[in-house]
Image (tube, rainbow, N blue to C red):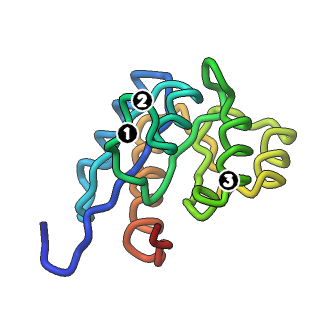
Amino acid sequence: MEEGKTERTILLVEDNDKQAHLIAEALKESSVPHQMVLVKDGVAALAYLRHEGEYNQRTRPDIILLNLNLPKKSGKEVLAEIKTDPKLKRIPVLVLTDSKSKEDILKSYELHVNCYITKSDDLSQLSKAVRKIEEFWLEIVTLPKE
């Protein structure tokens, strides 16, 4: 790790293996030291964030990349629980989803999402978006500490 650079933890909540792989590959090119943790459903995301069960020794994420369309518990339900939990609400949540629905966008912002990004079907565009997320959220922004 480069001196002066803190390793960041990114929690990716994504049930689509192909998209999770593409996001991980885009982040591999990052100049910011980081670890990416993948969970595949909303229940696992909340267990991770609350250090429950198999996640009891996990690091608190610096940012969360959250898909809305998840099994077990939707991304909107996860977002609502994060943003109403005093211990979690300061973690930036970035919705990264296929949904272009006006209702999903409005509801996400009503639930205090930090930003809403619609995934592109074009692999190079998705990779570019992930690199921009990394650049802005991990290099430019000052993130809150636990």
Secondary structure under tag 1 reads loop
From what the image shows, is residue 67 above or below residue 114? above
Residue 79, percent from left and from top: 68, 44
Residue name at image x 73 percent, y 53 percent: 84
Dot 1 corresponds to which residue?
Answer: 56
Tell me which label, 2 or 3, sits earlier in the chain.
2
Residue 75, percent from left and from top: 66, 35
Tell me which label, 3 or 1, sits earlier in the chain.
1
Name the disc covering residue 45, or none.
Answer: none
Q: Nearer the viewer, mark 2 or mark 3?
A: 2
Along the viewing direction, whichever of 4 and 23 lies nearer the viewer: 4
Along the viewing direction, whichever of 10 and 31 lies nearer the viewer: 10
Cα–Cα gap, marks 1 and 2: 6 Å
Residue 26, percent from left and from top: 32, 45
Dot 3 corresponds to which residue?
Answer: 85
Question: Label 1 neighbourhood size at 10 Å, few (<14), some (14-19), many (20+)?
Answer: few
Along the viewing direction, whichever of 14 and 83 lies nearer the viewer: 83
Name the disc covering residue 53, or none.
Answer: 2
Secondary structure under tag 2 reads helix
From what the image shows, is residue 5 above or below residue 49? below
Of the 4 image quadrants, the one containing the N terminus is bottom left
Res 46 quadrant in image: top right
Cα–Cα gap, marks 3 and 1: 18 Å
Cα–Cα gap, marks 2 and 3: 19 Å
Q: Amino acid at mark 1?
A: Asn
Q: Amino acid at mark 3?
A: Asp
From what the image shows, is residue 19 above or below residue 87? above
Q: Amino acid at mark 2?
A: Gly
Residue name at image x 40 percent, y 60 percent: 134
